[in-house]
Image (spheres, rainbow, N blue to C red):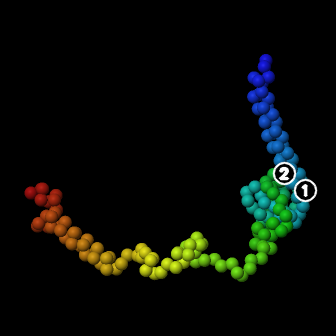
Amino acid sequence: MDILTLLPFIVLIGAMFLMTRSAKKKQQQAAQMRDQLQPGTGVRTIGGIYATVKEVNDDTVLVEAAPGVHLVFAKNAIGAVLADDEYNRIVHGDDDVKVDGSTVVPDDAGSLSGDAAADEATDSDKIDLGKKTEAKDADAGDVEAKDAEAKDADGKDGKTDGEADAK
């Protein structure tokens, strides 16, 4: 056989080998991480629960999700072991980042564009999207007039179409 006909198979087998190798490596790292669990560390489960490890057994881990709330998880359910500062930032909201008081959040989105013309807009340039009360009253009068005309057209003597047909 020619080497060119075997080349696609060789490339496919090599790609499969590399993919399985990286998957095995990730599994080994996860198993090592779970074996090194210590009481007092913060963890995130695969379900997204953040908790503190209280007790580690052979196949299970006892964690405290809230004060007085203890949960038992399988070791395989621990998705990540978090560093103390990351756990405190997520769970307790402790941010080490200092925000100075000079940051101003604008009330309208027009000032975010940096367009000077938008900043100089006056009240006369703005469009009023509300319905005016005068127009509302005029519309109500028109509807009443149309209803009266429809009643006159249905029957002059006030009888419905069914009653008129029955005679």
What kind of residue is marked 2?
Ala
Say which amino acid is labelled 1.
Gln
Q: Residue at x 58, y 77 (%)?
A: 107
Name the quarter where the N terminus is drawn.
top right
x and y percentages locating residue 32 in the rendered image = 89, 51
Is the Cβ of the residue at disc 2 closer than 8 Å to that at disc 1? no
Tell me the residue that label 2 is attached to: 30
Residue 79: x and y in percent read 79, 55
Report, in whole angstroms, how far the alpha carbon at label 2 lies from the one at label 1.
10 Å
Determine the image quadrant of residue 6. top right
| Residue at image point 79% right, 22% down | 3
Residue density around tag 2, few if under 14, some if 14–19, many if 20 or more, within 10 Å: some
**What is the quadrant of the C terminus in the image?**
bottom left
The furthest residue to the left? 167
In terms of depth relative to the viewer, which is nearer, 103 or 116? Answer: 116
Q: Residues within 10 Å of mark 1 (few under 14, many from 20)?
A: few
The image quarter containing residue 113 is: bottom right
Name the foreground residue: 41 vs 123.
123
Helix, strand or loop at disc 1?
Answer: loop
Q: Is residue 121 above or below residue 153?
A: below
Which secondary structure lies at badge 2?
Answer: helix
x, y (%) of residue 164? Answer: 12, 59
Vertical arrangement, residue 3 with respect to residue 135, above or below: above
Q: Earlier in the sequence, mark 2 or mark 1?
A: 2
Point out the residue furthest to the front here: 116
Q: Is residue 70 visible?
A: no
> Residue 140 in the image: x percent, y percent?
28, 75
Mark yes or no: residue 89 visible.
Answer: yes
Residue ID at (81%, 57%): 80
* Residue 36: mark: 1
